Image (cartoon, coloured by chain):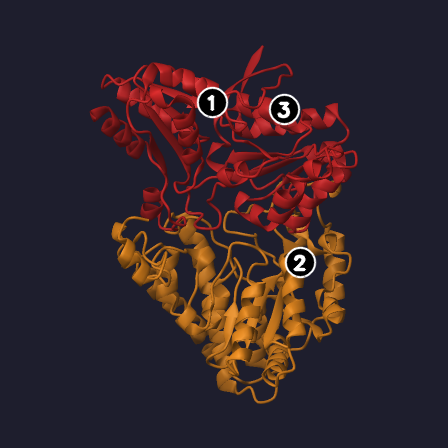
Chain colours: A orange, B red
Amino acid sequence: MVEMSTAMTAVTVEESLAALEEFKREVLAPMVPPEGLTAERQLEMYRKMALIREFDTNVRELWKQNFIYGIAHSYVGAEAVAVGACAALRKGDFISSTHRGHGHTIAMGADLKKMMAELMGKYAGYCHGKGGSMHIAAVDEGMLGATGIVGSGMPIAVGAGLSAKVLKKDFVTVCFHGDGGTNQGVWHESINLASTWSLPVIFLCENNQWAISFPYHKAARNPRVADRAHGYGIPGVTVDGFNPFAVYQAVKEAADRARRGEGPTLVEAKFYRYIGHFVADDEHYRDLRTNEPWRELDPLRRMAQYLVDAGVASPEQVETIYQEACQAVQGAIEFAKAAPEPSPNTLYDGLYSPEFLQMRGTDL
Amino acid sequence: MTKIITIRQALNEVLREEMRRDETVIIMGCDIGIRGNSFGVTRGLIEEFGSERVRDTPISEAAIVGACLGAAATGLRPIGEILFSDWITIGMDQIVNQIAKIRYMFGGKIEVPLVIRAPVGAGGGQAAQHSQSFEAWFSHVPGLQVVMPITPHDVKGLLKTAIRCNDPVLFFEHKRGYEIQGEVPEEDYTIPFGAGVVRREGSDVTIVAISIMAHKALAVAEELSRLGIECEVIDPRTIYPFDYTTLVQSLKKTHRLVVTHESTRRSGIGAEIVSQVVERAFDELDERPVIVAGRNVPMPYNRALESMVIPSEERLKQAILNLMDQ
C-alpha cells in the first residue's frame, strides 16, 4: 500500500488502536449465549455466519472474474449482526435492508442458489436479474429488499410496522441501516413516526464506523448512535456487533417489547468495517494498518472458538459446518453459472401489475 | 497553447483554478476529501485547500444542497456534490422549492451563486438506483440552469461559467465520460450557457445529441456517411438555456430532426426540444421528428436487458435509416 501522511489519513493507527481499546472497555461483550438458546440453534447461527462469509468471499472473486456485473458490497466481518438479529425473529417477521444486503438475506434463510443467480443477473435469481446485488430481495422469507439509497429503508420498515399495528398482527420488523444512514433526514423522521405511533419496529444500526471514506466520529459530534433514542422517547442500546449473542439478546428484548405494543427500540450494533466498502474499493482513503487490529474480533473466529470452548461442538464439527457452507456456496455458484439469462421479453415484467401490462401490451 | 486532458482532469483543474482565483469558492459532498470523490474528480483538493474549504459531509443530501443555498445567499460560492445524481431526489425540496425560487420570491434580493455537480448516466450494471439522468426534471423548474457537457473543453469552459454565475446551476457529468480525452486551451476561458456546437456538419438529418449520446451520434454519423447519408450532429451542451438558434439553422438545411438522450423517453427533454421546434420551425420539417432515448423502464441489472434500455448506436442508426426511407 501507499504510505500516507498523517494529515491525509482519516484515522491514524494510534487513534484506531485507542478506539479499539475503548471498544473493548465499553462495548465488547463475552460470548455467552442468552438463556434458552439451544446448542442446536447456536450451531445454526454459526452455519449461517459461515454461509455469509463464504458467499461474500466468493462474490468478490466472481466479480473480479466478471461473473458478477455491476457492484457488490461485502458483509464479511458483519456476520454476527445479521445472524444475531434474525435468529431472534419468528417466521412472519420482516426485515428491511441496505446496500450491503447479502448477509441479511442469508440470515433470513434465503436460498443461496437464487441469491447467486440474482448476482449473476440470471432469470432464476430472486429478482429475475432485474436487481442484482444492490437490490436483492427475498420477500417470501420476510426480506423486504436491499436498496442503493442510504437511509431509504427506514420508512419502509415503519410502514411494515404500521401494517402489523393496523392489521392487528404480531409480526415485528427489523430495520437494518448503517451509521451512514443516521444522518439522513428520513432516519429521524422514521424513528419519530414509529415511536409516536408505538410501532413494532427494531431500528438496528450497523455501526461499522465508516461511511465509505468518512469515519463516523467526523460525521456526528456524538459517536454513540444509541444516545439518539432518548430524543425520541424510546430505549436505545449499544451492543457488541462482533458478537451474535449480544445482538440476539438486544433484538430479542426489542422484539418482545414491540410485540407487547410498547413501540420501537434503537439497537446500535457497533463493530468495524475492516474490509473495503465494496468489491472494487482500494481503501486509498485510509491507512490499511488502522484496520488490522480490529480483525482480532473477527466474529466467525470468535463464534467458532466459543463453540469449541463451551463444549457445544468439537473442532472437527465446527470445521465440518464450515466445509458444508463452502459446498453449499459452490453449489450455488455452479447453479447460477449454468442458469439461463432472462429473455428480452421479460424487460417490462414487474414494472406494473400484470393487469396493467396486459392492457397496455408493449405500449409503455 | 493547448493540451490533451480527460474530463476527470478538466473537472479537477476547474475546481482547483476557481478555488485559487476566488477564496469564496468552497466544495462539499460525500467522500470528496481524502477519497477524492467516487470518480477521482476532487483528488488533491483537500491537500491544497484544506478541510475548511473542501468539506466531507455526512450522507445528508438535503442538508448539502440546502446549506449550499444558505452559503450562497450569504457570501460564499458553494459547489455541492451529490455522489450519484439518483440521490439528488433526497435534496429535491431544497432545489425545487428553495434554490430555484428564492431570488424570485424575495423580489430579486438574494443572489444564488451555487453549483450542484452530480454524475448521471447508465451502464456497467449499476441498476435502477444508480443509472438515472434527471436533466428534464430540472429543466422543468423555472429558476434553474442545467448543464451537461461531454468534452474536456466544454466541461472546463462551462463549469467555470457555472461557478462564476450568480444563479443556481445543475452540472451533470456522465459516469461513462470521465475518461474521455480532448484538447483544451492552457489559458483561462469560459463558455456561455445556451450556445450549442455543431460537432459534425451534414445536409440530410440533424441529430440533437445530449451528453454521452453526442459521441454515439458522431460514430453513427460516420457510419451513415458511408451509406451516403450526411448527419449534422449538434451537442447543445446546456439543457437550459437551450440553443434553438443553432438547431433551427441546421433544420433549414436538413429538414429532418432526430433527438437522442439516454434518459427515459417519456416526458424527457427530447419531448421539449421537439415541441419547441414544432413551434419555432414547423415549416422546416419535411418529416416527423424522431426521439431515440432510454426505454420507459427502470434500469435493469442484467447486462443484456440493460443494453436494451440504453439507446445504442445501432438503435440510433436504425431510427435514422427509417426516417430517411420515408
User: Does the residue at mark 2 contact the one at mark 1 (Cβ under 8 Å)?
Assistant: no
Q: Residue tagged by mark 2?
A: A209
Q: Chain of mark 3?
A: B
Instruction: Between residue B13 and residue A355, name the one nearer to us.
Output: A355
The N terminus of chain A - image quarter: top right
Element type at mark 1: helix
* Left or right: where A152 falls relative to B71: left
* Left or right: where A316 falls relative to A251: left
Disc 2 marks a residue whose amino acid type is Gln
Identify the mark at residue B244; answer none if there is no mark. 1
Does the image show residue A3? no
| Closer to viewer: mark 3 or mark 2 | 3
Disc 3 marks a residue whose amino acid type is Thr
* Quarter of image, res B277: top left
Q: Residue tagged by mark 3?
A: B161
Element type at mark 2: loop
Q: Position of residue B120 (x, y in %)?
A: 50, 39
Q: Chain of mark 2?
A: A
Which residue is rendered at x = 51% and y = 54% of the image?
A: A148
Most distant residue in the left direction: B325
* Left or right: where A86 falls relative to B97: left
